Amino acid sequence: MGLISGLLTLPLAPVRGTVWLAEQLTEEAERELYDEDRIMRELFELELREEAGDIDARTREEREDELLERLTVARDRRRLNDRGGGEDGR
């Protein structure tokens, strides 16, 4: 970026910074949401909670379905990344 263009776009710096921060937060949230190890731990904890009587079978099944969907997406995303599709699959 040249000096002139840098000066002309200086007023946009806070906007660029905000956009960058939002992108970073989104990426981190998606990493956590689709972390396979985390999903597996949640599935295991769900089973323990049902055995302890903290939740009923229906609640466990509903939550388990959600977790299994996330696990499928996580594995699809990993396969895309392994093939060179990038973090966001593009």
Image (cartoon, rainbow, N blue to C red):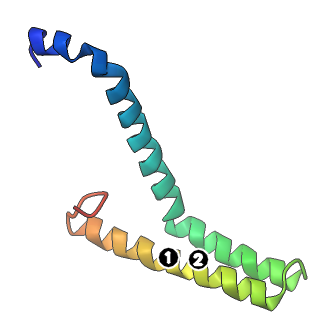
Looking at the picture, how far across and down is residue 28, in whole percent? 47, 49
Residue 8 quadrant: top left
Name the residue beneath numbered marker 2. 67
Distance, label 1 to label 2, CA atoms, is: 6 Å
Residue 83's label in the rendered image is none
32 relative to 27 in the view: left or right: right
Q: Residue at x 29, y 21 (%)?
A: 12
Q: Residue 30, position in %: x, y?
A: 46, 57
Q: Amino acid at mark 1?
A: Leu
Above or below residue 51? Residue 5 is: above
- Name the residue rendered at 69%, 77% in the picture: 44
State the residue position of label 1. 71
The type of residue carrying mark 2 is Leu
Vertical placement of 21 versus 34: above or below? above
Q: Circle 2 — which element? A: helix
Q: Is residue 41 left or right of residue 18?
A: right
Q: Residue at x 9, y 14 (%)?
A: 2
Residue at position x 35%, y 27% from top?
15
The answer to which image quadrant residue 45 occupies is bottom right
- Residue 51, percent from left and from top: 85, 85
Tell whether label 2 touches label 1 (CB within 8 Å): yes
Judging from the image, what secondary structure is the residue with disc 1 in?
helix
